[in-house]
Image (cartoon, rainbow, N blue to C red):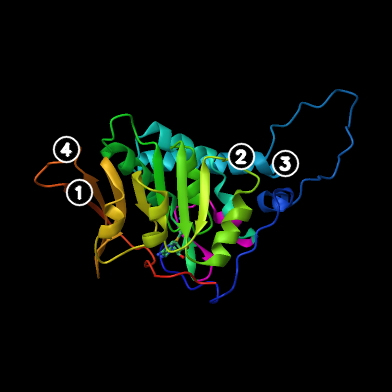
Amino acid sequence: MAKRPALKPGERATLPPPTQLTPKWGQSVSKPTAKPQSSQPLAKAPPKSSDNPGLASERLRSAMVARLSRQGITDERVLQAMGQTLRHRFVDDALASRAYEDTALPIGFQQTISQPYVVARSQALARDYCQVPDGPQVALEVGTGCGYQAAVMALLYPQVVSVERIAGLHELAKQNLSGMDLPQLRLVLGDGLVDAQAHGPFDVIVLAAGMADIPVDLLRQLRLGGVMVAPLGQPEQRLKVIRRSLDPFAPQPYQTFEFESVAFVPILRGVQN
Ligand code: SAH
């Protein structure tokens, strides 16, 4: 989410199909085979990360979840969803070894994959503040990017719509998510501030890009008791939760809660082909 100029404008992060993931997690899977010196059977050595790329990414992911919990994320479902979503599949091959660091990484088109803490924090706040009586069912993300947060959200809500304005990133997200069985997730190409409205109303709206002010039209898409989590403000951005009152006649229909400073890329308008 932080602005990083690492890829040139229009340059696209390409991802290999899952079968090509192997080299990311180790130097080589094949090892020189030493001949046993005696006829005694050799004790089996514990597997090293380089022996099993899947295991290496699993360890890094568990370490990331442990770090998130030390950083104050206590929502077990969010921690579980973060632990289940393979973040390394959403970044370029060259960056995959850094996928579980607590940092934003470039995904092309001058955009970034959000820092794990910010993804977890946004989802935990949404779940914590949402007062929709039967629990949140329908969620919207504005700013699919590479699709990572959308995949996390698909593990938290029965229905998720994620809108992206850059056609190349919409395609990249589709590609990244294609092997995952997430029929509850719908990816839409469009300007999330306008085109999401056809899919509402929503119990949860998460903006993955920053705005100076609250997007009022989108706020009207919240169900009673629903919440929007958004990086708002200029020049200083803060993560905010805006909750629609459960009472349709409340004199104050929306309540705002303010959290930490953040640095998201800005929301832009219209579709970029
Ligand atoms: N959700 C991503 C992070 C995406 S970065 C993740 O999981 O890491 C923010 C994204 O918001 C960018 O891809 C940007 O193109 C997109 N964006 C900005 N303005 C938008 C708008 N009006 N509608 C839809 N997407 C928008």
The answer to whether the residues at label 1 and label 2 have Cβ atoms under 8 Å apart is: no
- Say whether disc 1 or disc 4 marks the residue closer to the N-terminus: 4
Which quadrant of the structure image shows residue 215? bottom left
Say which of 211 and 69 sits in front.
Answer: 211
Q: Earlier in the sequence, mark 3 or mark 2?
A: 3
Please identify, in this view, whether the residue under mark 1 or under mark 2 is nearer the observer: 2
Quick check: 131 left or right of 95?
Answer: left
Seen as rendered, the residue at the extreme top is: 40
- The residue tagged 4 is 247
Q: Nearer the viewer, residue 270 or 62?
A: 270
Range of magenta residues: 94-109
Q: Quadrant of the image for the N terminus?
A: bottom left
Image location (x, y in percent) of residue 267: 37, 66
Q: CA distance from mark 4 to mark 3?
A: 57 Å
Query: In the image, what residue type sits under mark 2?
Result: Asp
* Ligand 1 - quadrant of the structure image: bottom left
The numbered mark, 1 or 2, whose residue comes first in the sequence reads: 2
Query: Quick one: label 2 or label 4, which is nearer the N terminus?
Result: 2
**Cα–Cα gap, marks 3 and 2:** 27 Å
- The residue carrying pointer 1 sits among few (fewer than 14), some (14 to 19) or many (20 or more) residues within 10 Å by Cα, namely few
Where disc 3 sits, the SS reads: helix
Q: How far, Cα to Cα, is label 1 from label 4?
A: 18 Å
Q: Which residue is mark 1?
A: 257
> Mark 3 — residue?
51
